[in-house]
């Protein structure tokens, strides 16, 4: 099975599990501060940083690339009143998202590189732990920048060391390379230490929910949480040699 198919099957199963598992919902709320059905690494502290880039006015449109079941967008909408758009290639995630919102939302099942939106549609575009899946990062970034209104912001959470190997110690990721190639100015915040602490909390919380997850028949997902957080069983210096996490802010 090729990697892409393996990932898509895993995400399908993941979003089916989170829909049914009470223990996983409680685990997310405790580990991340709010249950957004996180498969990634975004806690409330990171998501709250997005809020400052959402204009508080009427008719604001925001897009989440790799939106999963839309719960993170639900939080941003509650805080700002924005119209929310999201796409993800997981069919079950998008079905849940479509059920979750009865107005001011547009969710589409779609693949990076295939789905398209009209130029200058959004005030803010966010993508947490999903840009890695772009088959051609530069081409996709160019397309995404086209979707942004002038003055709009692209906010990206990007991690190296798991899906992608760590490439450097200076914030020069595949994503940053694409920004440079296109001559796009950006701000980047290195949150590797914050992520180390979050992953420690994720591991400790998962251990608290081990029994509940196993009783639901979700032992495989508990094992995956252990695997994902094995990296924090070593001291921070060793972790930081292999892992890095950045928040990129790009204003058009
Ligand atoms: C690591 S998860 C992050 C989910 C969510 N943004 C978060 O931070 O919790 C990656 C998400 O990207 C979606 N995804 C992966 N590859 C994709 C692709 N080629 N096109 C669209 N969505 C994709 C997955 O279904 C999944 O929801």
Image: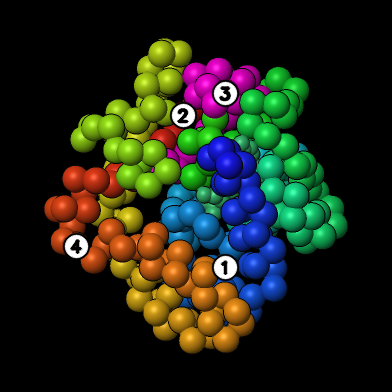
Mark 3 crowd level (few <14, some 14–19, many ≥20, 10 Å Cα): some
Circle on res. 234: 4
Give the labeled residue for mark 1.
35
- Rounded to the nearest angstrom, the CA distance separating label 3 from label 4 is 36 Å
Q: How is the image coloured?
A: rainbow
Ligand 1 within 8 Å, label 1 CB: no
Q: N-terminal of the two: label 1 or label 2?
A: 1
Where disc 1 sits, the SS reads loop
Q: Name the residue under label 2.
A: 250
Q: Which residue is drawn at 61% across and 60% down?
A: 14
Q: How far apart are marks 2 and 3 (CA)?
A: 15 Å
Distance from Cα at disc 2 to Cα at disc 4: 33 Å
Q: Earlier in the sequence, mark 3 or mark 1?
A: 1
Q: Which of marks 2 and 3 is nearer the N terminus?
A: 3
Farthest right residue in view: 102
- Looking at the rendering, the quadrant in which ligand 1 lies is top right
**How busy is the neighbourhood of tag 4: few (under 14 within 10 Å), some, or many (20 plus)?**
few
Q: Are marks 2 and 3 in contact (CB under 8 Å)?
A: no
CA distance for labels 4 and 1:
27 Å
Dot placed on the residue nearer the N-terminal end, 4 or 1 = 1
Q: Nearer the viewer, mark 4 or mark 1?
A: 4
Tags 3 and 4 touching, CB below 8 Å: no
Percent coordinates x, y for residue 221 in the rendering: 52, 68
Residue situated in front as seen by the camera: 218 or 246: 218
Closer-to-camera residue (89/31):
89
Residue corresponding to mark 3: 140
Q: Give the range drawn in magenta.
A: 135-159
Q: Is mark 4 on a helix, strand or loop?
A: loop
Q: Does the magenta stretch include residue 158?
A: yes
**Which comes before the other along the chain, label 2 or label 4?**
4
């Amino acid at each position: 099975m090729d990697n892409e198919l393996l990932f898509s099957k895993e995400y399908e199963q993941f979003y089916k599990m989170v829909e049914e598992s009470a223990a996983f919902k409680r685990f997310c709320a405790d580990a991340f501060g709010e249950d957004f059905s996180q498969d990634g690494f975004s806690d409330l502290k990171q998501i709250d940083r997005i809020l400052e880039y959402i204009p508080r006015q009427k008719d604001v449109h925001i897009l989440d690339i790799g939106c999963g079941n839309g719960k993170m967008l639900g939080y941003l909408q509650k805080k700002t009143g924005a119209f929310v758009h999201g796409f993800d290639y997981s069919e079950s995630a998008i079905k849940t998202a479509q059920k979750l919102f009865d107005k001011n939302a547009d969710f589409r099942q779609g693949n990076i590189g295939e789905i398209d939106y009209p130029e200058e549609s959004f005030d803010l575009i966010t993508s947490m732990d999903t840009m890695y899946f772009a088959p051609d990062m530069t081409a996709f970034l160019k397309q995404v920048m086209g979707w942004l209104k002038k003055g709009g912001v692209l906010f990206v959470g990007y991690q190296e060391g798991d899906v992608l190997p760590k490439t450097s110690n200076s914030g020069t990721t595949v994503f940053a390379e694409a920004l440079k190639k296109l001559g796009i100015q950006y701000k980047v915040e290195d949150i590797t230490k914050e992520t180390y602490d979050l992953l420690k909390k994720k591991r400790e919380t998962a251990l608290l929910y081990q029994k509940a997850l196993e009783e639901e028949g979700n032992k495989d997902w508990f094992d995956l949480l252990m695997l994902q957080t094995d990296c924090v069983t070593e001291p921070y210096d060793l972790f930081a040699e292999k892992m890095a996490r950045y928040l990129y802010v790009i204003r058009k």
